[in-house]
Image (tube, rainbow, N blue to C red):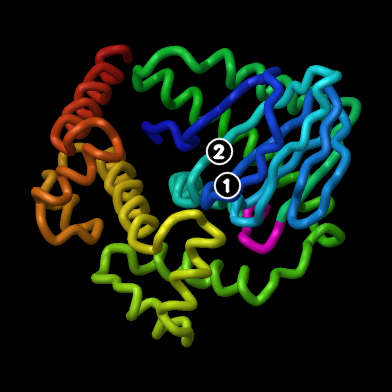
Amino acid sequence: MLMQEYDTFNYRLDSNMKPYIHSHTANEIYYFHSGKCQYLLGGELVDLIPGDLVVMNGIREHGPIMDNSMRYIRSTMMFEREALRNFALVPGMVDLSKPFQVETSYRWNLQGALKDEFELLLQQLNGLQEGNSAVALNRRSLKFYEILLFIYARFEEHADGLTSAPSEQEQLIHRVLSYIDRHFAEELSGEGIAEQMHVSKFYLMKLFKRYTKETVFDYVTKRRIAEAKVHFHSNPGHSVTDVCHRTGFKDASHFSRTFKKHTGLSPEQYRRLLLRAGNDSHAER
């Protein structure tokens, strides 16, 4: 599990901002420490209170409307759908993706021991942010795993009464994202995906852009790059050409340019970095 599955983690942010209503394809964990804030969540504007934990798939528009008369303190974490794949490989693992399905968002207010436990998990993860060695990466990964299990436990306790019915459009986007997740390594086109969904290409492209704020082509590319990173982490000895073909890129030079655009490193530089980290971890034992 030599990778950091989450993309961003902000601990106890206290900067106020203008209303920020947005959507995205990443999963999000949001925890409200203190202050005064209304939050748009799934079409409903709710008054947050300290201890509120919100988990969501970001496709529905959401965001805070802050009261500038009080400090607004929150911790947030974002990660892509495929980040949970590593955990799914653990024998006997529960489906940690359930609380983050497209059609759902959940809000729980934590009190007492549960509040203390979750705030301690956030504090501990924040204390592990320094360092890029194999040990540091794995410690962060395991703490992230603990946070997901905490959320899953709350989901099992309360989900039955909280699920909101998805709209037909949200169901369609969910099917498209699931289809791309299953077929990203194949040759994909807007026409082909629309045909599979039994809708017109124009309608699908417009709806996908509206909900995800990106094109189908951009999402497929980002999904392939994410899979390439996962593959390099799992198999750093594999060649760049092999990973290129396994992730749906037909041309190695195009793969290299695209990978560097998204990560800042060429595939070969990324692979060597992981090999070096792996050698360092063996040396530490």
Q: Which residue is located at x 49 percent, y 35 percent?
A: 6
Give the Cα distance between marks 1 and 2. Answer: 6 Å
Placement of the N terminus among the 4 image quadrants: top left
Q: Is residue 195 above or below residue 181?
A: below
Quarter location, residue 39? top right
Residue assigned mark 2: 78
Q: Which residue is located at x 50 percent, y 17 percent?
A: 129
Q: Nearer the viewer, residue 54 or 132?
A: 54
Q: Where is residue 233 in the image (x, y as percent from the top left)?
A: 30, 38
Q: Which of 28 and 110 is in front in this view?
A: 28
Q: In this view, does 265 lie above or below 93?
A: above
Q: Position of residue 216 (x, y in %)?
A: 39, 63
Which residues lie in the magenta part? Answer: 98-104
Confirm whether residue 96 shows in the render: no
Residue assigned mark 1: 27
Q: Earlier in the sequence, mark 1 or mark 2?
A: 1
Residue 217 shown left or right of residue 33 in the figure: left
Check contact, mark 1 vs mark 2: CB within 8 A.
yes
Secondary structure at badge 2 equals strand
Residue 150 shown left or right of residue 108 in the figure: left
Kind of residue sitting beneath label 2: Met
Confirm whether the magenta stretch covers residue 271. no
